[in-house]
Image: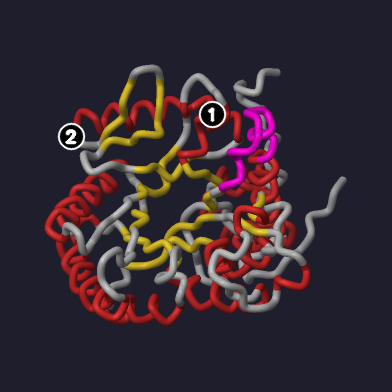
Amino acid sequence: MSLFETTPRTAPSNLRRRDVLTAIGAAGVAIFTSKNRLLASLAAEESQTPAHWPVTCRDAMLKKTEAPDCWAAMTAYGVDGVESDITDDLRLPYLYQGDRVFSVADPQAQDDLKKALDGAKKRITAFCMHNRFEERPDFELEWCSKVAVAAKELGVPAIRIDVVPRRMSRTDFLPFAVKLLRKIIDATEATGVKFAIENHGNTTNDPAFLDAVFEGVGSPRLGLTLDTGNFYWFGHPLSRLYEIYERFAGRAYHTHCKSIAYPADMRDKERPMGWEYQKYHCPIDQGDIDFAKVIGILRKAGYGNDLCIENEALGRLSAEEAIQTVRKEVQLLRNLQSSVTQEGRFVPVARV
């Protein structure tokens, strides 16, 4: 089978149970479960089965597959969709299909993209904006408003944003960012779309700064793109990472799943920001971060979007190696979702 052919999936083990419950209907369940312990047990088990989140990747990773188009690249990786970069003029530069340029700039372009996504059975789980707030605040307000409208039309639940000072001191930037974010939230209220600050760089990897922004803006529509690797990159000790994830899990509206494999004597101590990242960053199945714990924390917090792989180590791999690497990451996230309960407990799935 070619790497770019769709791999058949095994039917989930609880499909028959769902079909039974669906077929007899809610009224039938009430009647039969009162008389039949087996059906009662199945109904209770079904209600406790954790939902599976889509597993996606950053769209910037797609061309590494050397697939003929972005849809074949997603299939090669085995992902359900992508987080899609979006430009100032509302183009999606990493979604490629021959000479076609995808955009969300107008209703026709949005409709064309919807049809392409539906045809490929893929989805966009977040738009990725690269904001420059203090350099062009008026433009940023207008741009965020347009992206939010497009996100609503396409059913994209979150917009990843940068809240990073480029010219101001952090002290001056905080009130400036809070004021502009309030305007953005107010201007996009009708869309209901959530904005998700990525924790990255020397500012938003600081939990105290994030707390101050969230408190200052005071909106449930402003949250986090929880980048698991960036908090570790910043220098937080491994044992403290899970406390930080728990602290912000209730505000996580999108994720970046990535990891680092530091030497044992460097894992649980504070390190200089970015220490040896190029040497030690790695796929999530090879790194220090325990993704069973991550998924458990997100489950307990009621998380509801995707698990988005952001593998920044693909540049040193061949196309075939990149595909196999990402497929392993995808499978890890799928397997762990089947093994972590709604209450966040890890229960290994029995192998037959």
Density class for disc 1 (Cα within 10 Å; few <14, some 14-19, many ≥20) is many
Q: Is residue 337 visible?
A: no
- Say whether residue 5 is left or right of residue 153: right
Q: What is the span of residues highlighted in magenta in the rendered image?
A: 311-325
Placement of 351 over or under 316, stated as above or below: below
User: x and y percent of residue 116 in the render?
Assistant: 38, 26
Placement of 21 over or under 170, stated as above or below: above
User: x and y percent of residue 12 in the render?
Assistant: 68, 42
Density class for disc 2 (Cα within 10 Å; few <14, some 14-19, many ≥20) is few
Asked if the stretch drawn in magenta spans residue 16, the answer is no
In this figure, which residue is indicated by the disc labeled 1?
73
| Residue located farthest toward the left when viewing the structure as drawn | 138
From the image, state whether disc 2 or disc 1 is nearer to you.
1
Corner quadrant of residue 290 = bottom right
Counting residues from the N terminus, which is met first, the one under dot 2 or under dot 1?
1
Q: Report the residue at 75% width, 65% height from top.
A: 263
User: x and y percent of residue 335 in the render?
Assistant: 70, 50
- Say whether residue 58 is left or right of residue 113: right
In this figure, which residue is indicated by the disc labeled 2?
106
Q: Report the residue at 47% width, 23% height from top.
A: 69
Asked if the stretch drawn in magenta spans residue 317, the answer is yes
